[in-house]
Image (cartoon, grey):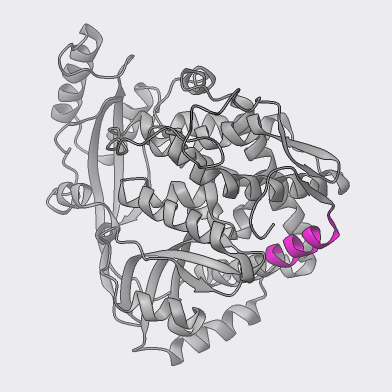
Amino acid sequence: MRLRSLTLACCSLTALALPLCAAAPHAALAATHHHTPSGKPATSAQTQPEPDDMIVAVVNSIPLTKRDVDNRGKLFALSTGLPVSDDLMARLRPQIIRQMIDEKLRTQEILSRHINIAPEQIAAAIGNIEKRNGMPEGTLRSHLAQDGVSLTTLIDQLRVQIGWVQVLRQELGPRSRVAAGDIAQRQAALKREEGRTEYEISEIFVKVDDPRHAEDELAFTNTVIEELHKGAPFPIVAAQFSQSQTALDGGSMGWVQEDELDPSVVDIVRQMPVGVGAVSNPITVPGGFVIVTLNGKRVVGKEMGHMVDIRQVFVGFDTPLDPQHVTPQQETALQKAMHISQTTHNCAEMEVANKAEGEKRPGNPGELPLERLNPQMQSVLSELPLNQVSRPMVSREGIALLMVCSKTEKNFSNRSPSEIADQLMNERVEQAARQLDSDLHRRAMIDMRVKLKGA
């Protein structure tokens, strides 16, 4: 998480929160027997289900209800594109309760510091979700309602994320600014590290309060791994459930060297394949379990690649595309995209054309690292001559046209001062967050109304 963009950190989470509008549904979960919220198979001896307003915990006199927990579970299932099943909910439930207890404590700390979350901040975060998912403005509420999720569930999560960022800024105080001397010291250290291996890693951290009773946390970690194997996107699961501050960046730790990692993590990443979406088994680390995926691997000082400066025109559809029933508006959009591709000859004209289409997506996404893009995008951009419009790329939401304005070679292992500052700040923020979370738990009065092992 970058402190200089802390006010936008919630957008990092929420931009990941609802991708299913633009993506094909993931494979359905295997059929399961009906389970009760306790995770045990239902029997004919059982009577009435637990009421939605049943209190599962009281945190400093503030109740946490079964409805709160169930809504958060539905939001997770919706955001990953996985169907809700009683079995999945039963396995997620203990960890959701723990996470929501943490959020209650954080909320109370936010209020005690008189930190006000302006409605405009919440509205901007929700608007960011809609924009990134190609949804018309103001439609997120109805989209969630279709799946039985209240918008309040997402708003509560956003409010905690935004407020906690401001709490951490207060905690850091003068340390919230990285001095030039700190950057120079890290640059000198990196220079000495040339020839060593670096890893680009994403993580999901599951906190364990009592190492003597970690059965539930381990079971939850294994459940997360199962869902990742079934297609749940790693950044979204990290944003929803990881209890590390890297959750705000979808679990991304950035580039790290072996001496910056726990030895048990090093042993695993040395053996993992790169960039294929492989996820580790649960790794025991101080304070809990971690799941990692390896996005990249390089030798310090020796990673050449290309930066591409591109422009985009997006012609949107009024309704999601059904290939079997193409609407007149969608036919017109395709004709318009073909006309743009034939009459546009430079990047300035691309920006003008995108503005004419309402700038539904950024006309200038900025410079992108070619080798780090997904394979489909790499194949389009790597072969595209400069100042030539790509073939139309059709999605459910509309048609995208791309143009490469310039392509330059770059040594990606050379970190800029701003990247080094980000990494230093990440370390400070993570340390401050863990210390403050620990302090809040130590001072709290938590009354568990359901039995959680180790709680």
* Residue closest to the far front: 45
* Residue 423, x across and y down, in percent: 55, 70
* Residue 391 picture quarter: top left
Q: Is residue 431 left or right of residue 80?
A: right
Q: Residue at x 63, y 52 (%)?
A: 6
* Residue 223, x across and y down, in percent: 43, 52
Main SS of residues in magenta: helix
Number of numbered discs: 0
User: In which quadrant is the N terminus drawn?
Assistant: bottom right
Q: Is residue 362 visible?
A: no
* Residue 29, x across and y down, in percent: 32, 38
Vertical position of residue 298 compared to residue 344: above or below: below
* Residue closest to the far bottom: 192
Q: Is residue 89 left or right of residue 302?
A: right
Q: Is residue 387 visible?
A: yes
Q: Residue at x 22, y 17 (%)?
A: 322
* Residue 105, x across and y down, in percent: 77, 49
* Residue closest to the far top: 328
Q: Residue at x 40, y 39 (%)?
A: 80
Q: Residue at x 16, y 41 (%)?
A: 388
Q: Is residue 28 magenta?
A: no
Q: Is residue 291 left or right of residue 115?
A: left
User: In which quadrant is the C terminus drawn?
Assistant: bottom right
Return the residue nearer the eye: 94 or 126: 94
Return the residue nearer the eye: 343 or 393: 393
Residue range of the region highlighted in magenta in the rendering = 433-444
* Residue 136 picture quarter: top left
